[in-house]
Image (cartoon, grey):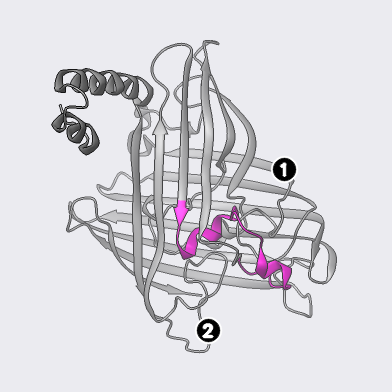
Amino acid sequence: MKLNKWTVGLAAVGAISLSSAVQAEESQMNVVNAVTSGTTIGGYVSTSFSYNFNTAVQGVTAANPMGAGQANGFNLDVVNLTIEKPLDESEWAAGYKAEFLFGPDAKYVGTSSLANTAAANGDFSYDTGSDFAIKQAYVNLRAPVGNGLEFKMGVFDTIIGYEAYNFNANPNFTRSLGWAIEPTQHTGLLSSYRINDIVSAVTAPEDMGALAGSTLYGGVVYGRVGTGSITGNATPGATGGNTTSWYAGLTLATGVEGLSVGGAFDYLDYRNTANTSGAASGSTWVGGLYASYQATEKLSFHTRGEYQRLNTGYADLSNDDAPSNNWEATVTAQYDLWQNVISRLEFRWD
């Protein structure tokens, strides 16, 4: 039994007996253990060095974590701290999750705790309001309805997309053009019901041979956007108005050991939003292809290619408001030399 310094000090001067101190400590620990049972603490730290071969551009895009001032140098990207108590196996179960972001790239989730000073000055390219953001904070509940009806209430990650905000969850370091037009977080109530083992995504069964384990996922998100962006992340453009996001993603097992391929399609349509030039409506879509190869236990390679079509009216467009196109290709080599450390060397062309 460890005693805190204040308790040991009291015992030394005779203010309380050592036996009573031990009993008090044990009583407190029993209460703490009951409250924190099943709770886990995790997170990560992301640091990087980036260099932009086009010296006239600093790499400021909604999809790229290299924000203003981060190109051509060493960077602290973000610090993630996650405290979670997952649902247990009981029929009536409760848990929670709180996920916090600290550092320059916390602004990319669009949930900064301070005002969006960039948007207030007419610059919608990214939020400069805060180096702190609440990524997720929700209560998780399960009711014994059939296979289990689950609820999340609070702030939680978007339910669509091939990529995620967290650096360690993606095959590449920089994020995709598709991610840039998707919502990042939702605030509200999310309910889910597991009909069977393929409810979350259509999964190819074992009897399909080489295609076994391939998955197909789709989703639609409709609603009014938050202040400061079109979709809730750092997309340049709009506040208010209604948006519809359509998404389809495919991960394909190839039958070749270590090789997997995937594809994603995002379509964003928004109506009657407000940007720097007044109310606007428009749409854009992105198609992307992915490939990953695990060469050895520690070495892997990841590639991504994307095409984006910006249609008339999209808030990203240049002053002539004409439809335009974006291309992006990324090649990443990952080597896991240390345990719990992801090391990547990446080249991206836009």
Residue 205 horizontal/vertical position (percent):
39, 28
Q: Which mark is residue 57?
A: 2
Q: Residue furthest front?
A: 14
Mark 1 belongs to which amino acid? Answer: Tyr
Percent x, y for residue 227? 72, 55
Residue bounds of the magenta highlight: 101-126
Give the CA distance from mark 1 to mark 2. 34 Å
* Position of residue 95 measured from the top left corner of the image (x, y, whole percent): 46, 25
Q: Position of residue 232 (x, y in %)?
A: 64, 53
- Residue wearing tag 1: 222
Q: Is residue 316 above or below residue 107?
A: below
Q: Residues within 10 Å of mark 1 (few under 14, many from 20)?
A: few
Please name the residue shown 64% across and 72% down the image. 325
User: How many C-alpha atoms fall within 10 Å of the one at disc 2: few (<14), some, or many (≥20)?
Assistant: few
Q: Are marks 1 and 2 in contact (CB under 8 Å)?
A: no
Name, please, the residue furthest toward the bottom: 56
Please indicate whether residue 27 sits to the left or right of residue 303 in the image.
left
Q: Where is residue 116, by image quadrant? A: bottom right
Q: Is residue 65 above or below residue 26?
A: below
